[in-house]
Amino acid sequence: MNDKTTDDVIISVRGLRNQFGSHVVHENLDLDVLRGEIIGVVGGSGTGKSVLLRSIVGLQKPIDGTVTVLGIDVRGADEDTRAALEARWGVMFQDGALFSSLTVRENVEVPMRAIEGLDPVIRSKIADLKISMVGLPYNAGDKYPSELSGGMRKRAGLARALALDPEIVFLDEPTAGLDPIGASAFDALIVGLSRSLGLTVFLVTHDLDTLHATCDRIAVLAERRVLVTGTMQHMLDVDHPWVHEYFHGPRARAASDGNRNNT
Amino acid sequence: MTKPQQTNLEIQTEAISGAVNLVGELSIYTVTQAKEAFQKLSAIKTINLSDLSRLDTAGAWFLLDRQAFLSTKGLEITLSGAKPEAKSLLQSVKTALPQPDQPKPHPPYFRTLLERIGKRVAGGLLYIIALTGFLGIFLHRLFRALRRPKEFRFTSLVHHCEEVGLRAVPIVALMAFLIGIVLAFQGSTQLKQFGAEVFVVDLIAISVLRELGILLTSIIVAGRTASAFTAAIGSMKMREEIDAMRTLGLDPAMVLFVPRILALLLMLPILGLIANVAGLFGGALMAWIDLGISPEMFSTRLVSGTSVNHVMVGLVKAPFFALIIGVVGCHAGMQVESNAESLGRMTSNAVVAAIFAVIVADAIFSIFFASLGI
């Protein structure tokens, strides 16, 4: 599965500290993400999975620590460097976060508009291509986000995140709120895209099936830091009560059985 | 935005063999340049990709698009020397290439225009019918509350009376006071020319008591309260609270509409009266300062020259305006769907519809009273 994974560290988080008032979310958090892998971040509610994602992409200002993405210090970078960096990653928010006043095609075109001299005809053709790559029907491009189902909005959000062919995509709860069929189709989409485009995928999830089906490595957030990272096999042997409960609970067993039957 | 890295594309052509060699990066940043260059080229046979440092989906799409375009002209081009990653990218883009649907035949313009007008007219009529239905529901529940007072929510009524009435007093009073001042000022400059300054009292009294006091109060209340009703009921509708109420055996009309509309019905005449007083006070103040008409003279002239009918004509309209505002606001709230955009849209629709309906009703009243000769 991880034939394209190299030891090239693409995201490196060191000594991250996040705090809201007196509530410390992260303390001394370290995490490395390797180029080409799909890493899944799991953790109980309120352990700051989304906060970690937001800190890496610079939406949340950490109190302390360094975040290095593609060799660039996210917090210390000047505006131009940051803008260039932002063109090399894409973020898909939980419900797609599409601009409601624009059609799906226009949404996908938004990041491309920043490129000087890009022919508008080519732009809309490429947008159509991205819409089709995430598995949306051809006529979805003309629709407004409010006319789409939850799963389609997520796909459209992914198409927008992929607009500039980023090297990394961040996915926040990609399968939350989808029915099992839609969720497993989305899992397959993530794996397929990451393999064919050589993407590094950072996904935050609760969904054990997604972990089984997509992730090369899993990082567990607990006790305000990344407790363990490793493959699914590795997770099953971890002797921490929460991790054990998570990966050996009844749902986990069902997910691993289901996955074994599929493959 | 700056480009992420060195984005150079060089296109080397060999005229004899018809081979094109691409050097550098073929990506979304260089695809426009490549398109322009390729339009000038003719008789391409092969495109060599071995010197490409980067190929992204935009570049892959471009190559495949060229290939397809030229093949319609009977020209075959081959892509040679693609690296394994580029090959797999080209393959996955090829499978994902969108297949456009058959374009639907467009109906003639005149027909779509007629269709749109027809839909609007029918929509307007349906809206009026729906509002009438809401009024019916309100009256029915009100009478039921009279028969079975236990079902009626008295606390809620008091709360809404405070929201709708008491809290609106400052803005309504200030508005009417300023209107009184404006009328006195404008009236006095005109009436001075005839030496008929004292008639400014009649001008202020009749216009404020008959029309402006209640009309402007209703417009302010429509803006304040219709939007508040829509927002409150609409956000409950959005979060399925109204459905929850129904499953719990609570009647949304009784719980939500009756206290709100009844509060408006009780409060709007009082607000109108406050506006009348404030308007007269502002007018009297300005008449005193500007024309030297003393407060005593103003009140004598007011009592002798203005019939109490004018006050009645003004205030009798208040309950009707209150019903209009309340029904429009509650109806718009119930039309909210499960997304936030519809809440915003219905809130502003409610304000526009309520103000418009109040003005139309006022015009109808004017005609009615004029034909009665009151």
Image: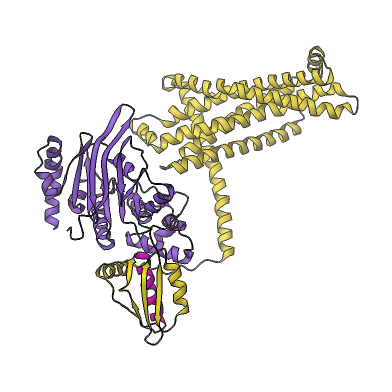
Chain colours: A purple, B yellow
Left or right: residue A221 compared with residue A162: left
Q: Position of residue B82 (x, y in %)?
A: 28, 73
The front one of B127 and B276 is B276
Q: Which residues are magenta?
A: B57-74
Look at the picture and state if B121 lies above or below B81: above
The front one of B78 and B180 is B78
| Residue name at image x 54 percent, y 43 percent | B127
Q: Quadrant of the C terminus of chain A?
A: bottom left
| Residue name at image x 18 percent, y 60 percent | A3
As drawn, the residue found furthest toward the top would be: B296
As drawn, the residue found furthest toward the right would be: B194
Q: Position of residue A6 (x, y in %)?
A: 20, 57
The front one of A218 and B143 is A218
Q: How many marks?
A: 0
User: In this view of the protein, can residue B347 be seen by the observer?
Assistant: yes
Q: Quadrant of the N terminus of chain A?
A: bottom left
Left or right: residue B214 compared with residue A43: right
Q: Position of residue B221 (x, y in %)?
A: 59, 29
User: In this view of the protein, can residue B313 be seen by the observer?
Assistant: no
As drawn, the residue found furthest toward the bottom would be: B16
* Residue B70 counted in the magenta span: yes
**Image quadrant in which you'd find residue B291:** top right
Left or right: residue A109 compared with residue B121: left
Q: Position of residue A237 (x, y in %)?
A: 8, 43
Q: Main secondary structure of the magenta part?
A: helix
Look at the picture and state if A51 lies above or below B309: below
* Residue B283 counted in the magenta span: no
